Image: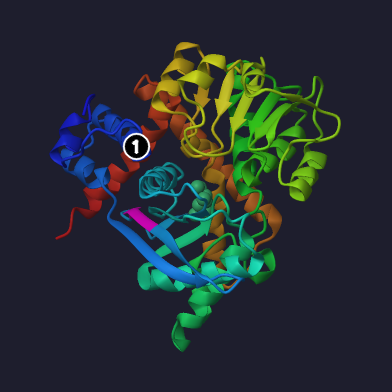
Amino acid sequence: MTGQTSTVLDELGFRYEPDSLYQQVISDVLDTGQQIDLPHQLQLILAQPKNEIMVHYPVQMDDGHYRLFKGYRVQHNNILGPYKGGIRFHPDVSLDHVKALAVLMTMKCALARLPLGGAKGGVQVDSRAVSYDELRRMTRRFTSALGDNIGPNHDIPAPDVGTNAQVMAWIADTYINLSDARSRFTGQAVVTGKPVSFNGSHGREQATGQGLVYIVTELLPELGIEVDGCSFSVIGYGNVGSWAARLFAQHGAKLRAVMDHTGAIHHDAELDTVALAEHVEKTGGVAGFVNSESISVEQFYRLELDLMIPAALEQMITDKEAAWVGAKVLAEGANAPTTPEGDRLLREKGVTILPAILCNAGGVSVSYMEWRQNRDAVQWEPNRVQEELRFYMNAAAQRVKLAAHKYNTDLRTAAYAAALEHVGQVYALRGIFP
Ligand code: GLU
């Protein structure tokens, strides 16, 4: 290994793999740990997840044949509280990615000061290519394969790429049906992001996009950019990207371009964020949207805008894309959308990066509220959720600014520093068992 983390990762016998997302993320986190003098034993603990659960399970498909699925749940750290993090259904799901995303959940919950740990799960499947019934059977069987590895006081999944409120409802129902009679009532808190009518929380669906909008409206003026009239682009028009765009447009910001797996579209003045969400819902992508011109990927990145919001998958912005980027600020809606080389190049170019663990902490913050509502058997008014989300996001933004000042560093390192300081304090208080 190269860099400051060499001692910890070498000690654990890591072999350097440049394409490993886990190594990229954990190296960043541990480098920050060195900078803030996080004790060596805590760096060792954080360098590997506590548990890596891998399951293979058969599901009968509609045509009668059986398919074997591979699913993961990685529980990175639970010093702050029960493990928490989404479940992803995507063909590219791998142990390496799920581990990286689990670390980011530990960091995200710590930065937002939620009493929750970090985890992530996933199944290798293209959720668009299976039928509704197949998706339901696959979800239920995955839940039963995970068994007691999840639970309302232990590990609480949520939606992520390729999963939604319906999938969460099936997980909760399966878990409840497998529980003994005495714990059935509390079983619903095994997942968050459920439909509002089945004990979900108001505001959870748009929470990640809403949280991102709280962050950018707070930080852009400090970077000399007016929110009203701010020009922006979005990568990915799924849950995070489309809600961020719709809610940001309500502040007078102008969506100029969007790119997804179907292509890139652009409008000189403004794309209609709401009509575009309907178009994507109907057709599956942004291509062919009325009142827009189609542009190339390179043209998309080169647009000279105030803000770009990558809200799709990881590692999209490598050094190649970073060289093209014409935006002044990047607000990471997706987890880890920028590779280390891309990140370095963007910083050299003077692009300000608002890091993922800050920008997309809104989803898990409202998940935390949903979990609390479930435990109390109540449902809060939408305004209460909004107010509390605004509080959590602003407090996290302040912590990042303070850490950037204290350690004289970029905002990503500052966000990790603010998260690790908290993890370090709690370890110091609790000690390491026994
Ligand atoms: N999957 C989301 C994330 O990456 C939400 C996690 C949660 O709500 O537990 O932050």
- Please identify the residue farthest to the top as the structure is shown: 349
Q: Is residue 12 above or below residue 410?
A: below
Residue 430: image x %, image y %?
Answer: 23, 54
Residue 300 visible from this viewpoint: yes
- Establish if 273 lies above or below 159: above
Name which residue lies at 41% across and 43% down. Answer: 104
User: Of residues 276 and 262, which is closer to you in this image?
Assistant: 262
The residue nearer to you, when weighing 370 against 170, is 170
Instruction: Please state which amino acid type lies under the numbered disc 1.
Output: Ser
Residue visible at 28% across and 29% down in the picture: 31
Rendered residue at 78%/37% (across/down): 273
For the record, the magenta segment spans 73-77
Residue plotted at (29% across, 51% down) = 49
Quarter of the figure that contains the C terminus: bottom left
Q: In which quadrant is the N terminus drawn?
A: top left
Q: Is residue 20 magenta?
A: no
- State the predominant SS element of the stretch in magenta: strand
Residue 358 in picture, x, y percent from top left: 50, 37
Q: Position of residue 306 (x, y in %)?
A: 65, 19
Which residue in the protein does label 1 denote?
20
Front-lying residue, 126 or 47? 126
Residue 265 placement (x, y as % from top left): 74, 28
Question: Circle 1 sits in a helix, a strand or a loop, which is it?
Answer: loop
Q: Is residue 151 visible?
A: no
Residue 105 to residue 164: above or below: above
**In the displayed structure, does residue 319 sit left or right of residue 239?**
left
Label 1 C-beta lies within 8 Å of the nearest ligand 1 atom: no
